[in-house]
């Protein structure tokens, strides 16, 4: 089954005739420490889709993801994630971790124009209406990403991650492993329940 983006897509949350609705869009050329989205009405959305890109302030900065609950980062060592990284010479590298304090989305992006991280993420958060068992099935992400490093080298990445805690997040944060973001753009959609 494919994703349907109806004629009213990109309209405000109050439009209930579209499957996907635009929640936020931001483009900036100023320095920010992170991208934080809070106070999402998770009872209205089955999942979120975040599409965008960032250029970190520091060379070789990793891109990390955190779920957030009521304005606070979820940082318990309960994140598990895996990334498959494809190199242009048909080489494949994999990285996987368990019991971490964050979810790593992408590795060592460069910090000048044309470098950095690009991503297309599907984010599923458990909400307060979920039963106890279904709470344990939520709080995960899948993504495709592109990383261009400090030498202009391309890497294609596919990843999955899970937060193994019975939490009901209503936000998330993307943050570089060090430094800040010098440039960024993103759009966030929600799939109505």
Image (tube, rainbow, N blue to C red):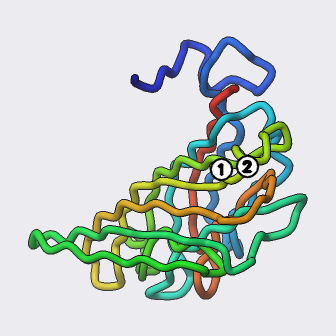
Name the residue at 77% across, 70% down: 74
Q: Is residue 3 above or below residue 64?
A: above
Q: Position of residue 63 (x, y in %)?
A: 53, 74
Q: Neighbour class for label 2 at 10 Å: few (<14), some, many (≥20)?
A: some
Q: Quadrant of the C terminus?
A: top right
Mark number, residue 135: 2
Residues at marks 2 and 1 touching, judged by CB atoms closer than 8 Å: yes
**Position of 76 compared to 186: left or right?**
right
Q: Residue farthest to the left?
A: 89
Q: Residue farthest to the right?
A: 70
Q: Residue farthest to the front?
A: 133
Q: Position of residue 55 (x, y in %)?
A: 50, 71
Q: Position of residue 16 (x, y in %)?
A: 73, 15
Q: Neighbour class for label 1 at 10 Å: few (<14), some, many (≥20)?
A: many
Q: Which residue is mark 1?
A: 138
Q: For numbered disc 2, what is the local secondary structure? A: helix
Q: Quadrant of the N terminus?
A: top left
Name the residue at 53% across, 87% down: 58
CA–CA distance between discs 2 and 1? 5 Å
Name the residue at 63% across, 47% down: 124
Q: Is residue 131 above or below residue 110?
A: above
Place residue 107 in its image quadrant.
Answer: bottom left
- How many circles with numbers are drawn on the protein? 2
Mark number, residue 129: none
Name the residue at 46% across, 87% down: 59
């Amino acid at each position: 089954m494919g994703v349907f983006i109806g004629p009213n897509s990109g309209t405000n949350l109050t439009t209930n005739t579209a499957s996907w609705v635009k929640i936020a869009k931001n483009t900036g050329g100023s320095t920010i420490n992170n991208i934080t989205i809070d106070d999402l009405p998770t009872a209205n959305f089955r999942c979120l889709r975040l599409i965008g890109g960032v250029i970190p302030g520091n060379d070789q900065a990793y891109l990390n993801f955190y779920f957030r609950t009521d304005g606070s980062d979820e940082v318990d060592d309960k994140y598990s994630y895996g990334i498959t990284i494809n190199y242009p010479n048909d080489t494949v590298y994999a990285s996987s971790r368990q019991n971490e304090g964050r979810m790593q989305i992408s590795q060592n992006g460069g910090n000048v124009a044309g470098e950095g991280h690009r991503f297309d993420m599907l984010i599923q958060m458990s909400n307060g209406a979920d039963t106890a068992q279904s709470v344990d099935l939520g709080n995960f992400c899948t993504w495709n990403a592109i990383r261009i490093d400090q030498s202009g080298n391309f890497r294609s990445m596919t990843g999955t991650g899970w937060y193994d805690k019975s939490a009901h997040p209503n936000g998330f944060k993307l943050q570089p492993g060090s430094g800040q973001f010098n440039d960024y753009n993103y759009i966030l959609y929600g799939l109505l329940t």
